[in-house]
Image (cartoon, helix red, strand yellow):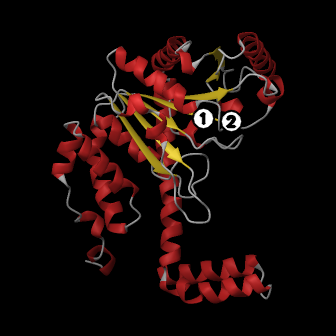
Amino acid sequence: MSDRTKTDKTAVEPLDQALVDGVLGRRPRALAKAITLAESTRPDHARRAARLLDALLPHTGRSIRVGISGSPGAGKSTFIEALGLALIAQGRRVAVLAVDPSSTVSGGSILGDKTRMERLSVHPDAYIRPSPSRGALGGVGEKTREAMLICEAAGFDVVIVETVGVGQSETTVAGMVDLFTLIQLPNSGDDLQAMKKGVVELADVIVVNKADIDPDAAELARRQIAGALALLHSPTSHAAAVVVTASAARGRGILEFWTEVERLHAEWTQSGALAEKRSRQGVDWMWARIDAGLRSRFRSNPRVRAELDSLTRSVARGDVAPTAAALRLLDRAESTNC
């Protein structure tokens, strides 16, 4: 047996069966503990989380996964609470994974999404999990996918991912959910915004929210966005989004929105498009974890760590080109693995 096999802890890491049973038994404390384990950056926790996810995997995949994005102030949290309460009234169980931006100065996050969803957060058929972005790009957390699977295993049949809400580049969530929703506001340059590349072209449903403030402006925005998307759409590209109006604060348009979600979800399930999409997302997820793991192992490599600080200072002073420094460190990591 090689030294590498002897030191491979992945094969001997014990499965926390009590935690698995707790998640499958729909116990909130076990659910929170499982997500915390998945989000941990400790290597031993990562191995335990991997075993946990493997055990839970047969019990996942039965929910409708919805991503919701939009600029700050668009009313995402109000919309999600109204939607969650409406779905619970239909007999569903709803999990909300809300991603909060982390400070680039202190690294902290407010995690105040439960405060903005007071009624939904206390409902026994709902679960709200605020998580920090921790510098992850694309509006979601690094372990949002893992949290989504854990919530599915806990019996939630609708999982909503609320993004940070930062702008046109917030597209990562579209690659982990079944259906991507964008919340817009009236009078925000609607026809021009609809023509921008990025988050808009990936949306499956666009909601013009706060329609109660000015119904005429909301309807005009809906027509402008729908018209612009129809002009840009081609038969070989992503299907043009459905555009609806709503007033989350007054509970209007919520069920109409969900009707569109169910219609699209049923169509994609029947055609096989949803299974294909989830399969593709699973492979992308694997490569994302590989990339993250390689970065972590690179930084912890003894030869890399021995030169990292000095090379970093040299690059900062302008003595060494960044490309040359990067290649030198990569060579150190590669020589260790040979």
Q: Give the SS element for disc 2.
A: helix
Residue 180, given in percent of the width and then of the height, sits at 57, 30
User: Which residue is label 2 attached to?
Assistant: 199
**Going 58% across and 36% down the picture, which residue do you hit?**
174
| Quadrant of the drawing holding the N terminus | bottom left
Residue 49, given in percent of the width and then of the height, sits at 32, 55
Of the residues under marks 2 and 1, which one precedes in the sequence?
1
Residue 115, given in percent of the width and then of the height, sits at 45, 39
Q: Could one spot residue 338 in this view of the protein? A: no
**Going 35% across and 26% down the picture, which residue do you hit?**
157
Contact flag, marks 2 and 1 (Cβ < 8 Å): yes
Number of callouts in the render? 2
Image quarter for residue 205?
top right
Image quarter for residue 211?
top right
Q: Give the SS element for disc 1.
A: strand
User: Which residue is label 1 attached to?
Assistant: 69
Q: Residues within 10 Å of mark 1 (few under 14, many from 20)?
A: many
**Going 41% across and 64% down the picture, which residue do you hit?**
41
> Disc 2 to disc 1, how far (Cα)?
9 Å
